[in-house]
């Protein structure tokens, strides 16, 4: 009999507590091993996601296979139970492991046919894509929720989440702490340290000084909130009067000392010296001419001085290297519009899948409630499971919210980038140095300059456009570009 190991996995503790997933996998895999005359040396079980490498017992399995050259068979239920990332897939492939996937009817080894390897590779990519797509949909749902004025997360001190109504409400137990905090600091007579001491003495709460400052500056109390770097108007009830909030911000401003502001030069921070990698700085000569030079922090440097006008001309030549021909621009724009239609069809399919899962959750909750009434399950078990199902249902609703509105931003951003590459140099030569620098910062992340040449580092996707232009690879076929 050939030696083999068994691997089973669930993604979370919640799935493990359901009590059927791991046992069901092990039963199936043991039966498969017995049917195919395999001797099971070890069984490995993980309770964590497989989207990233580093699972504890998966690593144990790999080490066991390294120490046991006679054992080269791994039996797992299906691809996404074994791995959802390419690194783990390649790890087993490099060990010449023979992968048996009973539910998919696949046996993958170095001697497998190319078609079987192709199908397995597709399964790995789809398993990874499932995780990435779910993350994107949750983010879209959170963004949609924020645009509706609902904070997509746990609110700050003084508020709480109402899970039944899915709203944010004032927490009567902690609201007095926040009100007192704002009143004390708005008076201008209390430092953050004194506010912290007063709250500890009056309410017996141990908030750190930095936490107090963070709360006092949080725009949530003024009716707005930040999410994903953007400010949204909120629909939650105000705990703090807007006038008091503004007074508190005024106190913070009065404590800030004015700082000397240096003159800003157009191409400052954009260039590095090619000789010693120091920053290229600027200075004014004769109160009118702007020159750029190496800072010389690493000693005397061979980089000469450049007048701003000369430097602007040299940098402008970079933009000629990302020019997209008009006919190629038209082809790429049509391709983006075609992809948008395909994404819309995928969104409909994903919405249907999420609705099916939501209906399944509700049926399960209804059946469990009947079992509770009939005494088949305990009250504690019902409450635990109900909480888990409610949490998963909320995540599904957030993903569905993200699918409600079409998101053409990515397509239009792509079209704008292509149009910018097509017209970048033409726009550049018409502008003043400050505007020229802004355009360069969109296209470039850095530049190295020496006495004779400029070596740019392009931002994505302008680096890809540059490579195509450099190699003259703009092809007439639509998909080739």
Image (cartoon, helix red, strand yellow):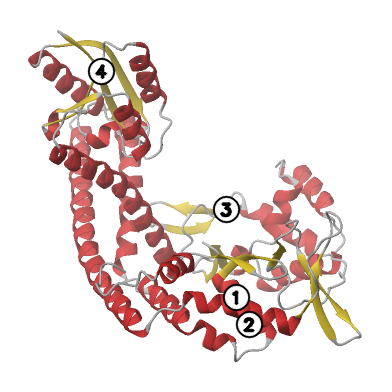
Earlier sequence position, callout 3 versus callout 4 = 4
Crowdedness near tag 4: few (<14), some (14–19) or many (≥20) residues, C-alpha within 10 Å: some
Label 3 secondary element: loop
Instruction: Residue 436: give its label.
Output: 2
Cβ atoms at labels 4 and 2 below 8 Å apart: no
Instruction: Give the labeled residue for mark 1.
Output: 440
* C-alpha gap between disc 3 and disc 1: 53 Å
Q: Is residue 336 above or below residue 300?
A: below
Label 4 secondary element: loop
Q: Nearer the viewer, residue 331 or 220?
A: 331
Earlier sequence position, callout 3 versus callout 1 = 3
Instruction: Residue 172: give its label.
Output: 3
* C-alpha gap between disc 4 and disc 2: 61 Å
Pick the quarter of the image with the N terminus.
top left
Label 1 secondary element: helix
Crowdedness near tag 3: few (<14), some (14–19) or many (≥20) residues, C-alpha within 10 Å: few
Q: Residue at x 43, y 64 (%)?
A: 143
Q: Which x, y percent locates residue 165?
A: 38, 57
């Amino acid at each position: 009999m050939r030696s083999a190991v068994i691997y089973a996995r669930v993604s979370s503790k919640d799935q493990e507590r359901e009590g059927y997933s791991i046992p069901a996998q092990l039963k199936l895999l043991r039966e498969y091993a017995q049917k195919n005359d395999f001797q099971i040396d070890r069984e490995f079980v993980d309770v964590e996601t497989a989207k990233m490498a580093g699972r504890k017992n998966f690593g144990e399995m790999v080490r066991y296979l390294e120490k046991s050259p006679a054992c080269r068979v791994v039996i797992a239920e299906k691809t996404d139970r074994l791995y959802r990332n390419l690194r783990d897939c390649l790890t087993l492939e490099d060990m010449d492991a023979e992968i048996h996937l009973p539910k998919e009817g696949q046996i993958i080894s170095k001697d497998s046919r190319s078609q079987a390897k192709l199908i397995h590779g597709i399964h790995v990519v789809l398993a990874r894509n499932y995780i990435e797509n779910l993350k994107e949909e949750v983010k879209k749902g959170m963004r949609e929720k924020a645009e509706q004025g609902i904070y997509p997360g746990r609110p700050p001190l003084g508020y709480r989440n109402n899970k039944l109504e899915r709203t944010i409400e004032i927490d009567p137990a902690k609201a007095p702490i926040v009100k007192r905090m704002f009143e004390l600091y708005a008076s201008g007579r209390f430092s953050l340290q004194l506010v912290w001491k007063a709250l500890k003495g009056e309410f017996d709460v141990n908030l750190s000084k930095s936490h107090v400052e963070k709360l006092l500056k949080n725009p949530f109390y003024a009716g707005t909130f930040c999410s994903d770097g953007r400010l949204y108007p909120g629909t939650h009830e105000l705990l703090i009067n807007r006038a008091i909030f503004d007074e508190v911000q005024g106190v913070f401003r009065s404590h800030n000392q004015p700082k000397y502001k240096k003159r800003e030069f157009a191409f400052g921070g954009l260039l590095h010296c090619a000789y010693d990698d120091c920053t290229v700085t600027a200075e004014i000569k004769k109160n009118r001419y702007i020159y750029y030079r190496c800072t010389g922090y690493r000693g005397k440097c061979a980089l000469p001085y450049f007048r701003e006008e000369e430097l602007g001309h040299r940098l402008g030549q970079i933009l000629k290297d990302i020019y997209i021909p008009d006919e190629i621009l038209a082809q790429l724009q049509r391709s983006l519009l075609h992809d948008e239609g395909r994404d819309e069809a995928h969104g409909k399919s994903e919405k249907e899948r999420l609705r099916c899962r939501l209906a399944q959750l509700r049926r399960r909750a209804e059946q469990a409630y009947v079992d509770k009434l009939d005494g088949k399950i305990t009250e504690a078990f019902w409450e635990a499971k109900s909480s888990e199902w409610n949490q998963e249902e909320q995540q599904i609703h957030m993903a569905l919210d993200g699918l409600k509105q079409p998101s053409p931003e990515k397509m239009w951003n792509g079209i704008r980038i292509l149009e910018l590459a097509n017209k970048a140099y033409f726009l550049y030569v018409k502008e003043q140095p400050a505007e020229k620098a802004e355009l360069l910062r969109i296209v470039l992340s850095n530049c190295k300059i020496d006495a004779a040449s400029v070596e740019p580092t392009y931002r994505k996707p302008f680096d890809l456009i540059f490579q195509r232009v450099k190699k003259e690879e703009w092809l007439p076929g639509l998909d080739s570009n």
